């Protein structure tokens, strides 16, 4: 009896997860896409005027703040790739010089445990023009040094990039370190025997071998950049003006600030499309990689 | 497809290597100096946070952000804990601390319980559409929160949990479910078939096998997932901000409100003390359980 009953148990056990997936993910995404075609404002209004179904999207792409958000998405995305590079350099150094590995790893990774709100607030304090690092630089003799990045629309994004690099490079270091350690030890000794120079070893052998790790890092970074919200709230709250708006910030502002759920939904749909554009290559690469590993295994 | 989640029972995040014989070369020194400088850069914000939080405002106004306090004071900490204002409420970040704790426990139980059973059912039982479902979960783990937030707000209003501790906890559990299920499923799928068939022969039912065999084997992965979840729930801002009501907002939201919207003279020392108080619980976990923390973070990477 028990055995027969057990055929049903796994299915019953899966019901909550299925319901959640169907309602909270699939259904909710569908709902948001639908609402983005309507003229809903504070409350959902389910009538669609098919003659102007793209109304919210047309508005969106005429909105200067949205253009700024998209531009900042690119700026932050490009800027934060420094975190990957920095992470790789750190990992390579740690891997080469095994002394102090535990100590350095602990230091480089602690920012990950700190919430982005806290991280943003500390950096905001350090960017303080009168009392922060700028003042310190002036005191030690760099009279023209300017570190008041957050106050100007032209440089505020660089401040956010710096804080993001501080927060994220440890994570990429951890991924890179795992990647480096999975490289066959024979390659290191072979390279040493052949007298391959330090730079050639890394640029021509190690980095190409780790291209999947780099790709994974790049994709994870892009996904993180699309979601960037907390750090902006904590550092600039979108300012000065709307110079540090990002899509996530825009969507939530359209919802909470302007109480316009159709507009917020349209922005969210574009975010989903951007995520999909990053996500699909990830799926393809992983699938390709799995197939290749299977081919090697045979 | 789900193989980018790098956890399996026998895999360690970092392999131990034998130590090299101690003979310091010039290049080693250069590397160590470089690493130390990078470590200083990474450590500076924590240092600044700590020294600022124990300085008097008089010293802070001198503008020496890196100097040690001439006179150590713990008054900012007391103020941050008891008096800081968030909106019109001036009861300190302790309100947020207790809210965050109250959110944390139900979130952990809901999210881990649900994902564990789901992961176990998908990994060890023949469910026909398991592959499809896993793929949908994998996709769901990447979805930006904004695309499901508004319907979730409406739904949680319908089931009357919007603005409550339970509302926040349920949303945490819902959002964590896809990723945690994948982590558990990837861990359980490596349990040998022989164990499962032996257990089935022994008239083991779904739940008996779960509680008597699978659960006792889950120690490692449970610690990793616990740390991942504690950190991400504690550090969450968006869910707390949009699903927490008056008096149920978590610590990060109280902190952000009190620092960003504070009016009048700004007490940077109190701000930094409040920030530190918020950062301490995950930092303690990190420094005590670092190894598991790294595994958790890498596994939760796609959460962003």
Image (tube, rainbow, N blue to C red):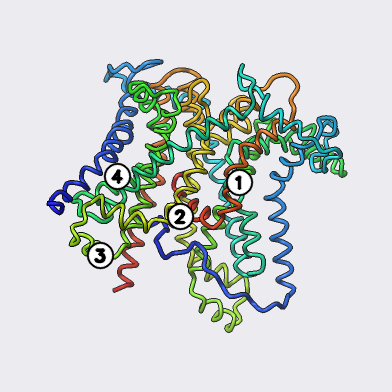
Residue at 49% in and 66% down: A208
Kindly tell me whether residue A82 is visible in this rendering: no
Mark 1, residue position: B283
Residue B266 against residue B71 in the figure, above or below: above
Q: What is the C-alpha distance between the residues marked 4 and 1? A: 34 Å
Which of A99/B144 is in front? A99
Q: Position of residue B201 (x, y in %)?
A: 18, 62
Which class describes the residues within 10 Å of circle 3: few (<14), some (14-19), or many (20+)? few
Mark 4, residue position: B136
The chain under label 1 reads B
Mark 1 on the same chain as mark 2: no
Mark 3, residue position: B193
Q: Are marks 4 and 2 in contact (CB under 8 Å)?
A: no
Q: What is the C-alpha distance between the residues marked 4 and 2? A: 20 Å
Does dot 2 land on a helix, a strand or a loop?
A: helix
Q: Are marks 1 and 2 in contact (CB under 8 Å)?
A: no
Mark 4 on the same chain as mark 1: yes
Number of the front mark, 4 or 3: 3
Does dot 3 land on a helix, a strand or a loop?
A: helix
The disc at residue A216 is 2
Q: What is the C-alpha distance between the residues marked 1 and 3? A: 40 Å
Left or right of residue B1: residue B31: right
Does dot 1 land on a helix, a strand or a loop?
A: helix
Number of the front mark, 4 or 2: 4
Which of B56/B23 is in front? B56
Residue B142 against residue A263 in the figure, above or below: below
Q: Are marks 3 and 2 in contact (CB under 8 Å)?
A: no
């Amino acid at each position: 009896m028990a055995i027969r009953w057990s055929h049903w148990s796994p299915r019953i056990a899966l019901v909550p997860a299925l319901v959640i997936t169907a309602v909270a993910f699939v259904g909710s995404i569908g709902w948001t896409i639908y609402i983005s075609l309507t003229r809903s404002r504070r409350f959902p209004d389910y009538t669609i005027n098919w003659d102007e179904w793209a109304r919210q999207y047309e508005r969106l792409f005429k909105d200067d703040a949205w253009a700024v958000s998209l531009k900042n998405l690119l700026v932050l995305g490009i800027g934060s790739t420094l975190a990957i590079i920095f992470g790789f350099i750190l990992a390579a150094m740690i891997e080469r010089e095994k002394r102090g590995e535990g100590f350095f790893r602990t230091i480089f990774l602690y920012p990950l445990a700190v919430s982005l709100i806290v991280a943003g607030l500390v950096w905001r304090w350090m960017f303080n023009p009168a009392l922060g690092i700028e003042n310190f630089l002036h005191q030690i003799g760099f009279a023209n040094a300017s570190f008041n990045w957050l106050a100007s629309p032209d440089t505020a994004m660089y401040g956010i990039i710096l804080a993001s690099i501080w927060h994220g490079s440890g994570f990429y270091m951890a991924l890179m370190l795992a990647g480096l350690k999975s490289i066959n030890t024979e390659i290191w000794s072979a390279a040493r025997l052949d007298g391959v120079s330090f730079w050639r070893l890394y640029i021509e052998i190690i980095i190409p071998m780790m291209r999947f790790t780099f790709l994974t890092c790049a994709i994870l970074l892009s996904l993180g950049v699309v979601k960037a919200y907390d750090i902006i709230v904590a550092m600039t709250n979108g300012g000065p003006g709307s110079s540090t708006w990002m899509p996530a910030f825009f969507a939530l502002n359209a919802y909470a600030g302007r109480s316009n759920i159709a507009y917020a939904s349209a922005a969210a749909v574009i975010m989903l499309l951007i995520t999909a554009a990053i996500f699909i290559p990830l799926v393809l690469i992983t699938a390709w990689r799995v197939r290749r590993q299977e081919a090697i295994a045979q | 497809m789900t193989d980018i989640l790098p956890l399996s029972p026998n895999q360690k995040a970092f392999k131990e290597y034998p130590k090299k014989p101690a003979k310091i070369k010039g290049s080693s020194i250069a590397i160590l100096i470089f690493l130390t400088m990078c470590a200083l850069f990474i450590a500076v914000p924590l240092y600044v946070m700590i020294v600022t939080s124990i300085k008097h405002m008089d010293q802070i106004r001198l503008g020496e952000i890196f100097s040690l306090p001439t006179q150590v004071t713990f008054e900012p900490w007391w103020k941050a804990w008891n008096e800081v204002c968030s909106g019109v409420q001036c009861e300190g970040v302790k309100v947020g601390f207790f809210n965050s704790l109250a959110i944390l426990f139900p979130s952990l139980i809901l999210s881990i319980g649900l994902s564990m059973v789901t992961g176990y059912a998908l990994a060890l039982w023949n469910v026909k559409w398991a592959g499809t479902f896993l793929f949908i979960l994998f996709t769901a783990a990447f979805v930006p929160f904004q695309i499901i937030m508004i319907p979730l707000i409406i739904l949680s209003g319908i089931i009357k949990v919007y603005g409550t501790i339970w509302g926040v906890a349920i949303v945490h559990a819902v959002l964590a479910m896809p990723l945690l299920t994948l982590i558990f499923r990837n861990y359980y799928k490596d349990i040998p078939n022989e164990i499962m068939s032996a257990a089935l022969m022994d008239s083991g039912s779904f739940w008996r096998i779960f509680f008597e065999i699978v659960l006792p084997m889950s120690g490692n992965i449970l610690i990793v997932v616990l740390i991942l979840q504690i950190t991400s729930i504690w550090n969450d801002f968006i869910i707390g901000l949009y699903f927490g009501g008056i008096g149920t907002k978590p610590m990060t939201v109280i902190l952000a409100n009190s620092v960003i919207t504070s009016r009048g003279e700004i007490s940077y020392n109190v701000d930094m003390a409040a920030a530190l108080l918020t950062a301490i619980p995950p930092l303690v976990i990190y420094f005590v359980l670092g190894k598991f923390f790294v595994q958790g973070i890498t596994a939760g990477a796609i959460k962003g």
